[in-house]
């Protein structure tokens, strides 16, 4: 637990504006202000992926990635982001994740004009077992892998989709490891044919990483806020004085 100097508390409107700027997505299917609760400063903010993770939440406001079907108590402010969260904080063009992976020279990968991933280079080449070990620690587990033909990795693609065309394009771009949420059959066939290494971390693991990152950014932006992440395991927590 880190104790910080007490400062002014944010309002719900301030949190909504911050989230709208951090997680923009014109096509998002949920409003950022999912429910406006009691008109008071927000002292305690909890974050969760699903309503089931936030049963009997004790906070002034709750951020949910998937608020669908949630029926909160009237005084609770509920904030949400579905498409924007996935787009900016999971396996897409995600700068904080690139920093965590140590990727340089980032290039977006787009489809229909929208970023769906990124490529980047490690400062130093990594052998496949070391890369897998790093990813296992970073995400708290790995769902599946496809062994590469070449055991040394320097160029990595982080992608929110896995089609045969995307795999082929990544290989043509010199990518040796393809990081995504789940392995898809057409993409698997292309990766095995071309000798591309693939790591599927699991969609929920990527979301959990993103939720922890969002909590850290909110705590930095609003130092007086008590922030906690709820779920199957505590990802991150910071309490204010």
Image: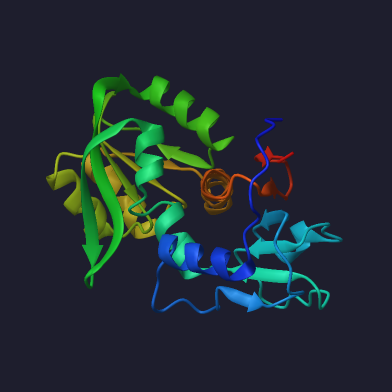
Along the horizontal axis of the image, is 187 left or right of 169?
A: right
Query: Does residue 150 appear anywhere in the picture?
Result: no
Front-most of 47 and 42? Answer: 42
Position above or below: 152 against 115 = above
Q: Residue furthest right?
A: 56
Rendering coords of residue 215 (x, y %): 58, 48
Q: Nearer the viewer, residue 28 or 201?
A: 28
> Compared to 239, does 204 lie above or below?
below
Judged left or right of residue 153, residue 200 is right
Residue at the image point whose x is 34% and y is 59% from the top? 186
Q: Is the N terminus in the top left, top right, bottom left or bottom right quadrant?
A: top right
Give the x, y percent position of residue 65: 59, 64
Quarter of the figure with the C terminus: top right
The answer to which quarter of the image holds residue 162 is: bottom left
* Residue at image coords 46%, 26%: 134
Q: Residue at x 73, y 74 (%)?
A: 39
Q: Is residue 125 left or right of residue 200?
A: left
């Amino acid at each position: 637990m880190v104790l910080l100097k007490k400062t002014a508390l944010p309002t719900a409107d301030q949190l909504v504006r911050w989230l709208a700027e951090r997680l923009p997505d014109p096509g998002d299917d949920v409003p950022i202000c999912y429910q406006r609760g009691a008109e008071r400063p927000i002292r305690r903010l909890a974050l969760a992926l699903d309503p089931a993770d936030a049963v009997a939440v004790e906070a002034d406001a709750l951020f949910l990635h998937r608020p669908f079907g949630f029926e909160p108590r009237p005084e609770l402010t509920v904030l949400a982001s579905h498409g924007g969260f996935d787009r900016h904080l999971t396996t897409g063009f995600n700068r904080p994740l690139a920093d965590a992976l140590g990727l340089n020279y980032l290039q977006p990968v787009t489809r229909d004009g929208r970023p769906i991933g990124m490529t980047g280079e490690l400062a130093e080449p990594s052998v496949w077992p070391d890369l897998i070990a790093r990813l296992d620690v970073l995400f708290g587990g790995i769902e599946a892998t496809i062994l590469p033909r070449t055991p040394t990795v320097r160029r990595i693609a982080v992608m929110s989709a896995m089609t045969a065309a995307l795999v082929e394009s990544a290989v043509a771009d010199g990518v040796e490891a393809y990081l995504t949420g789940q392995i898809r059959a057409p993409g698997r066939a292309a990766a095995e044919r071309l000798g591309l290494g693939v790591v599927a971390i699991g969609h929920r693991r990527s979301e959990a990483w993103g939720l922890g990152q969002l909590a850290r950014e909110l705590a930095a932006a609003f130092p007086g806020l008590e922030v906690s992440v709820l779920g199957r395991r505590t990802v991150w927590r910071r309490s204010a004085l």
